[in-house]
């Protein structure tokens, strides 16, 4: 059995914290003097919020973005760290978030009034950012109403309206007129508000895709960017890849069975593959419950001894069958790399995303809870 096998688990996700830190520093250098907001939604995209955030703090990060209150509270205890909820918040979550010093999102007057009420009740100011819908169509005050709304909201007591931000739906499309229009719209809005004496300490619109494709999104007047998928060494399949990034994850398991099967033998549910000849096949104890996409069925490969072994048949919940004809010396217990590896056969989240018809975010967030996370 290979030396790096984890004998305490059937499948494990190795997270290279050194690569994570290098990625953070490379992003920070590329967008300087902008601040990098490290986005750690969904348990740091499934990699583990606590170890990932601690590693990023060691690398110099002091600003984090999350999706919801529980994530924010897990980070808010770190001294000297700013934690911002980026999406939306329920009214009954505001008091706890305000008490913990979490930066709150706001895109309607009712929420603004609840934030103000929480600040007055606490007896100290609460920080908040205005979320503007410049074209995402998901959350935020509509652009046409933004100036009017902000002028009213800033009159409420107890709130430090320190920031304004928006989000891109198609920043992975290099040269997109739609994205450039959003950037221009935010500039116009901020200029209009500035003429009324309303300014913001933090101004951000760039996500990972925009960092690679739209330099204007992290040029003045913007002074922060939100980096998510790029931290993990992944890119959207479309668009430029401006940043130099290292892979952060490797998903591994072990051969649990090695067998010789006759020509014509069916493999997996639906009998979608029949062996064309007598073959040596292996079974690995990892499946779609662990994050292996159904899309790799009969199309993808894994690595045994860093050699590509094709997936045979349909991926099932707990097991996947692979061809071992290129590694006849493979035995039960050998380590199998499902994501990661080196050289031309290396498998990235983007590879799986292409087969699944998805994107790298989905691949990272789909790694199941029974896959042990290991930090190296």
Image (tube, rainbow, N blue to C red):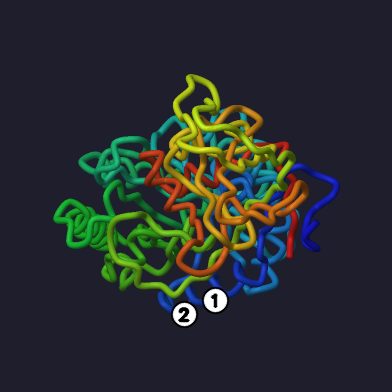
* Residue 54 in the image: above or below residue 101: below
Residue at the right extreme?
8
- Tell me: 127 left or right of 172: right
Q: Residue at x 37, y 62 (%)?
A: 199
Secondary structure under the numbered disc 1 in the rendered image:
helix
User: Residue 205 appears at what percent x and percent y?
Assistant: 35, 57
Q: Are marks 1 and 2 in contact (CB under 8 Å)?
A: yes
Name the residue: 58% across, 57% down. Answer: 64
Determine the secondary structure under disc 2.
helix
Res. 108 image quadrant: top left
State the residue position of label 1.
25
**Which numbered tag is attached to residue 293?**
none
Q: Residue at x 61, y 34 (%)?
A: 261
Q: Nearer the viewer, residue 142 or 218?
A: 218
Q: Residues within 10 Å of mark 2 (few under 14, many from 20)?
A: some
- Please give the residue where the numbered disc 2 appears in the rendered image: 29
Q: Is residue 100 shown left or right of residue 354?
A: right
Could you tell me residue 229's position as x and y percent? 48, 56
């Amino acid at each position: 059995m290979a030396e790096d096998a984890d004998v305490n688990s059937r499948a494990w996700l190795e997270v290279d914290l050194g690569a994570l830190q290098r990625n953070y520093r490379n992003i920070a250098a590329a967008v300087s003097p902008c601040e990098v907001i490290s986005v750690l939604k969904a348990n740091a995209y499934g990699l583990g919020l606590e170890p990932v955030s601690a590693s990023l703090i060691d690398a110099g990060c002091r600003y984090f973005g999350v999706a919801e209150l529980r994530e924010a509270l897990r980070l808010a205890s770190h001294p000297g760290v700013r934690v911002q909820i980026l999406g939306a918040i329920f009214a009954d979550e505001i008091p706890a978030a305000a008490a913990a010093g979490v930066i709150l999102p706001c895109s309607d007057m009712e929420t603004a009034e609840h934030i103000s009420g929480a600040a007055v009740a606490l007896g100290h100011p609460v920080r908040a950012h205005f979320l503007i819908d410049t074209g995402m169509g998901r959350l935020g005050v509509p652009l046409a109403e933004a100036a009017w709304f902000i002028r009213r909201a800033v009159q409420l007591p107890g709130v430090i309206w320190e920031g304004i931000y928006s989000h891109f739906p198609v920043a992975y499309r290099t040269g997109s007129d739609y994205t450039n229009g959003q950037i221009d719209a935010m500039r116009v809005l901020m200029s209009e508000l500035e003429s009324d004496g309303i300014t913001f300490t933090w101004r951000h619109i760039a996500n990972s895709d925009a960092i690679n494709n739209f330099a204007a999104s992290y040029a003045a007047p913007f002074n922060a960017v939100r980096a998510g998928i790029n931290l993990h060494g992944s890119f959207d399949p479309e668009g430029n890849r401006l940043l130099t990034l290292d892979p952060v994850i490797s998903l591994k398991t072990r051969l649990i069975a090695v067998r010789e099967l006759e020509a014509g033998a069916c493999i997996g549910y639906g009998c979608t593959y029949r062996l064309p000849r007598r073959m040596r096949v292996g079974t690995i104890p990892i499946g779609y419950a662990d994050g292996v996409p159904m899309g790799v069925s009969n199309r993808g490969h894994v690595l045994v001894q860093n050699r590509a072994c094709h997936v045979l048949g349909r991926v099932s919940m707990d097991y996947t069958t692979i061809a071992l004809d290129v590694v006849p010396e493979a035995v039960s217990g050998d380590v199998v790399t499902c994501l990661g590896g080196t050289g031309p056969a290396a498998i990235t989240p983007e590879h799986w995303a292409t087969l699944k018809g998805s994107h790298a975010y989905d691949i990272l967030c789909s790694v199941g809870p029974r896959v042990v996370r290991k930090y190296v």
